[in-house]
Amino acid sequence: MNPHHRRRFSLIAAALVVATTVARADDLPVYQDVEFQPLAAQARRVAQSLEMLGQPLSAEERARLDAAIETADPGPGVAAIQELLDERCLVGVEISAESRVKSAPGPAAPKLVQGGWSVFLVKVRNEAGVTARLLVESPNAAPIYKQSTGSAEPKHGIDKADLIDRWCDVAMYDDRPMVRRLSGLSVEYRIVQIASRDAGRREAKLTFSVGQGSQDLGFRGDVDVLFAIEPAVTVTLGVLDVDDRPTMASFVIKDRLGRVYPSPSRRLAPDFFFHPQIYRADGETVLLPAGEYDVQYTRGPEYLVQTRHVTVPGGETHREDFKLERWIHLAAMNWFSGDHHVHAAGCAHYEDPTQGVRPEDMWRHILGEDLDVGCVLSWGPCWYAQKEFFDGSVSKLSTAENLMRYDVEVSGFPSSHAGHLSLLRLKEDDYPGATRIEEWPSWDLPVLRWGKEQGGVVGFSHSGWGLKTDSNEIPNYEIPPFDGIGANEYIVDVVHDAVDFISAVDTPIPWELNVWYHTLNCGYRTRISGETDFPCIYGERVGLGRAYVKLDGPLDFDAWAQGIKEGRSYVSDGRSHLVDFQVDDRKVGEEGSELNLPAAATVKVRLKAAALLAEKPTPKTEAIRSRPLDVQPYWHLERARVGDSRKVPVEIVVDGLPVARREIEADGSIQDLEFDVAIARSSWIAARILPSAHANPVFVIVDGKPIRASRKSAEWCLESVDQCWRRKEPAIRDSEREAAKDAYEGARVAYRKILSECDAD
């Protein structure tokens, strides 16, 4: 030990003879009744943690700590360790013998940096020997949002003034090398982390406790701290597309500890608190503290995900430039992507202090995920506020390459028990004669007919809910419970030619496809479409479920919606694609997707297929592949990977059963495929990469006879009508029940007729 440290320890020891505590002006008490060895061990862990958190002890502080730990005299060592660590303490906490907690300000300068995390120590005097976790709360760190309950009723919560006061995040750091609980030592040190959304001066109330009932009388567990917050660096992001044009992209910014910036819990629209990513256009900015970051950037599933290490130097401004890369470009082939089911209010969105988010916010997310078409559907939560953005046409924010339109999901309405409906391309969003949600019909068929009468394209949302079966076979012959909000009453409405599409991708694939396959086998021609139900079923981002529609000309919403209705499309998770599917010379979606043959024959099936997987599975992707089909993500290309290869299977399906299979390399290349398929009777033919992409069918009519593919399918549909009636009838209004009963009976009559015309099981 050097002479300087010996003299210092001697002075400390002499002072400690007088009392067990030495209280200096504006300092925390130094306690002597603590054992040296465990205090020294804990001090080492604190030092290691501070280094890992990016705010290490200085060289001088490290030398002082080493000298204190190496002393042969524990008494002065105990004091020296406390004196050193006390300098970094924002708060001192005392736990009385009765386990009551009170707090006092410490000597550390209360300085923060905007947008980043600052680290302080908390000195704990533990007279009770408590071994619970030390907890911290703050009203200034309360959530700035109130998540939806799914109710259409107005709610009361925080107002805009509260946003000013909720400016920080506060958290105890309990991860290794620290330990999660207090040790029970009479003195130890904990780490508190504080992040600020704002710059300038802000006050926060910090409340410490060791569990329920531990706060001292008179709110002495509270401590008020006035922070000085240094502005962050304004980082300008240059964002160029593959053709060097400025664009919008998705960015996930993390520090070396994996913490996300800006802090998600302090975000306000257009950045969503339930996302790690933010969306920024070329020339826009993000506030970051000086430091090092890993930045992941992309723009939807047709782009590669790239990562760069970025150093933000100190100063006022900085610039980083990013160039995006694609692996496929479907719009260049006139296949335009769309997500027909996203929301600007409800579910993960906050409803306070505003009723959802504005079109400008949703537009940023549609652009950032490269959705050619985004359908924002107003529904029960915030209905009366959000419907103001509906005008029966595409949003004025739209461009030639990206379109956004407001329409309706019938959810939170009286008919919701029969199945939620997506109503697209509406001219009018108020049901005739209804001034409030509660006045809409209590079953689906009238709503679907109303939508179609005004030129809308209408179908069922999140189709699998209520159609669960134990079997994962597609099709299977179990009768589902019909007790949910998916395509339940579809089994009736399809008979009355009231349904244009059934939605897929956002519920378990066996439940979605089973009901669709059975009705196709009975000769009905409802098409399939893709959706996300953002941010209710999937909150990660818009466009996780997509419909790709082939257009002959430039992007146009009416033509795109008509393509959904006519089935000139396929659905996908965006990781695989089934392009230009055709049977003989009949392309999907053209001339009713109908190919007429005079007699049984072999047809030529052609398509272009593409998919992209990493060369080898990773633990993360293996976890996806090993999940049951009823666990998210429901549709994901990784589930289709063949073993440990990079191959996925493309299947040709006839009347619901695979008849041909070709494995392709999922390397991003577009591959031309041909199949010879024997057709014995009128049938429907589709292509799929299960569970990642599914083409709409081509209907092959042999000798002019309707498709009657399966007696079992007809029997399944007939029994399902009865099951659906048992479940839905009690919630249908008395005034509407007779009409509903007639419609259900009409469906039974139709299925009985189909059953009598089937000659194959």
Image (cartoon, grey):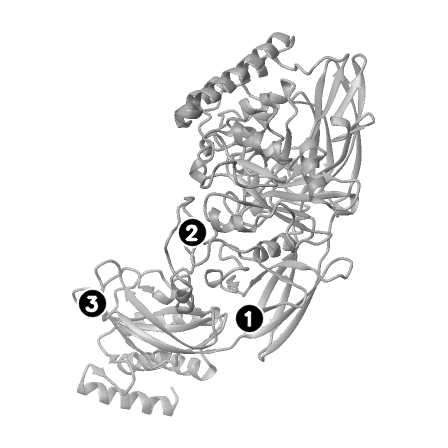
- Relative to the observer, which residue lies in front, 266 or 426? 426
Q: Nearer the viewer, residue 522 or 729?
A: 729
Q: Quadrant of residue 599?
A: top right
- Residue visible at 42% across and 69% down? 164
For mark 1, what is the residue?
288
Residues under labels 2 and 1: Cα distance? 27 Å
Give the quarter of the image for residue 140.
bottom left
**Local SS, label 3:** loop
Q: Name the residue that disc number 3 marks.
A: 216
Decide which of tag 3 and tag 2 comes sooner along the chain. Answer: 2
Is 506 drawn above or below residue 27 in the view shown? above
* Badge 2 element: loop
Residue at numbered disc 2: 147
* Amino acid type, mark 3: Asp
Marks 3/2: CA–CA distance:
32 Å
Which residue is at a point 59% across and 22% down the rendered structure image? 496
Residue 733, percent across and down?
41, 27
